[in-house]
Image (cartoon, helix red, strand yellow):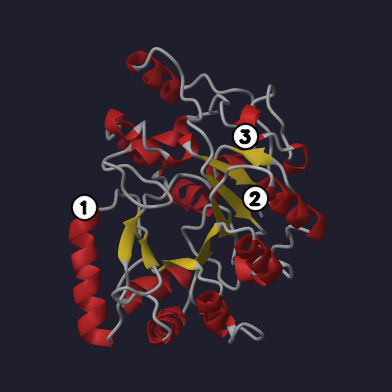
């Protein structure tokens, strides 16, 4: 289990690198997306998971915090709620959060691992997603069965393909249909390849072999955080991977990193600049509201971004955000 330990403001090399090419540190450019982590419980225990999610995790956003999230959405100009976990579907208030956000007229993104749709009580979720006009971002770290099952557990790939076919049948991923994005993560300590080229590989392999269609592919780098950090440390590759990310720093990604337009809400309501900072215990700065109960859009929309050397993962190569490559 990963323990959250608040850390002091970083003065590490990423901070220095940014200041060497910009007169000012990174700041928010406004909040268009509220990313809400509703808990770390998951039906899977993926080897690359940065929050260390799994069946044994008990951290779950409660009803009162869900209410505070909805109040923040109702009283501010935020257009999108991005719901993540763990497997967000396992939160008891998940459907209420989705349907209430839809009533508020918000764009709704749900990050699903696909296999959770086969769990008890979840079989009707694809229809629920369609009826609520939910945009799906579905984790499928490779198009090959062997790689997916190695990262996520035996039999997971088959469940994912079955879920994708069902979603396709409901209009997801089809031309003029509901958006269904797939997410690729490298299987090891290396950067993802070109997102465009990889998307063509996914389309060919999934289409020809399984008859599966999707809207687009997001290629994400694995940050040395959480379970992936532990894996790197055990294998002795942690320092090499950190050096790889730092050496691949791309200054052109700084204006597009997700923290510039996103605010992250932890399962307990604490506020962060991103989901990775949440795992590291790097809450937002002391000059702004620190909990969703005290949400103030104007203050939070102009906050300074807290950074650390893990931020090289979002700025390496083509860049890596919740919506894929940035450069």
Residue shown at 32% from the left, 77% from the top? 174
Name the element at disc 2. loop
Looking at this view, name the residue that lies furthest to the top. Answer: 23
Name the residue that disc number 1 marks.
194
Percent position (x, y) of residue 149?
Answer: 41, 75
Depicted 103 relative to depicted 213: above or below = above
| Residue 173 disc label | none
**Residue 83 picture quarter:** bottom right
Does the image show residue 67? yes
| Most foreground residue, 299 or 88 | 299
Q: Earlier in the sequence, mark 3 or mark 1?
A: 1
Does the image show residue 3? no
* Front label number (3 vs 2): 3
User: Badges 1 and 2: C-beta atoms under 8 Å apart?
Assistant: no
Name the residue that disc number 2 marks.
2
State how far apart marks 3 and 2 are (Cα): 14 Å
| Residue 282 disc label | 3
State how far apart marks 3 and 1 are (Cα): 30 Å
């Amino acid at each position: 289990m990963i323990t959250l330990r608040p850390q002091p403001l970083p003065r590490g090399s990423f901070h220095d690198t940014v200041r060497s090419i910009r007169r000012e540190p990174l700041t928010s450019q406004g909040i268009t997306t509220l990313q809400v982590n509703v808990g770390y419980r998951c039906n899977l225990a993926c080897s690359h998971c940065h929050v260390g999610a799994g069946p044994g995790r008990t951290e779950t956003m409660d009803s009162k915090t869900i209410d505070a999230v909805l109040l923040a959405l109702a009283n501010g100009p935020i257009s999108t709620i991005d719901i993540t976990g763990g497997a967000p579907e396992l939160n008891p208030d998940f459907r209420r959060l989705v349907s209430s956000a839809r009533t508020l007229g918000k764009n709704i993104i749900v990050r699903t691992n696909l296999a959770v749709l086969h769990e008890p009580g979840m079989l009707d979720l694809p229809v629920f997603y369609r009826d609520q006009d939910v945009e799906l971002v579905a984790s499928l770290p490779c198009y090959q069965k062997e790689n997916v099952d190695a990262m996520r557990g035996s039999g997971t790939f088959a469940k994912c393909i079955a879920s994708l076919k069902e979603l396709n049948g409901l209009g997801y991923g089809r031309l003029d249909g509901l958006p269904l994005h797939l997410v690729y993560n490298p299987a090891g300590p290396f950067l993802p390849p070109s997102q465009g080229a990889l998307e063509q590989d996914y389309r060919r392999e999934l289409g020809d072999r399984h008859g599966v269609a999707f809207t687009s592919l997001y290629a994400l780098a694995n940050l040395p955080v959480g379970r992936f950090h532990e894996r790197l440390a055990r294998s002795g590759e942690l320092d090499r991977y950190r050096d790889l990310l730092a050496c691949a720093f791309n200054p052109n990604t700084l204006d597009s990193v997700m923290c510039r337009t996103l605010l992250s809400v932890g399962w307990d309501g604490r506020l962060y600049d991103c989901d990775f900072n949440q795992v590291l215990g790097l809450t937002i700065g002391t000059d702004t509201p620190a909990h969703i109960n005290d949400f103030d859009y104007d203050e939070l929309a102009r906050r300074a971004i807290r950074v650390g050397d893990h931020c090289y993962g979002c700025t390496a190569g083509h860049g890596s955000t919740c919506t894929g490559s940035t450069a």
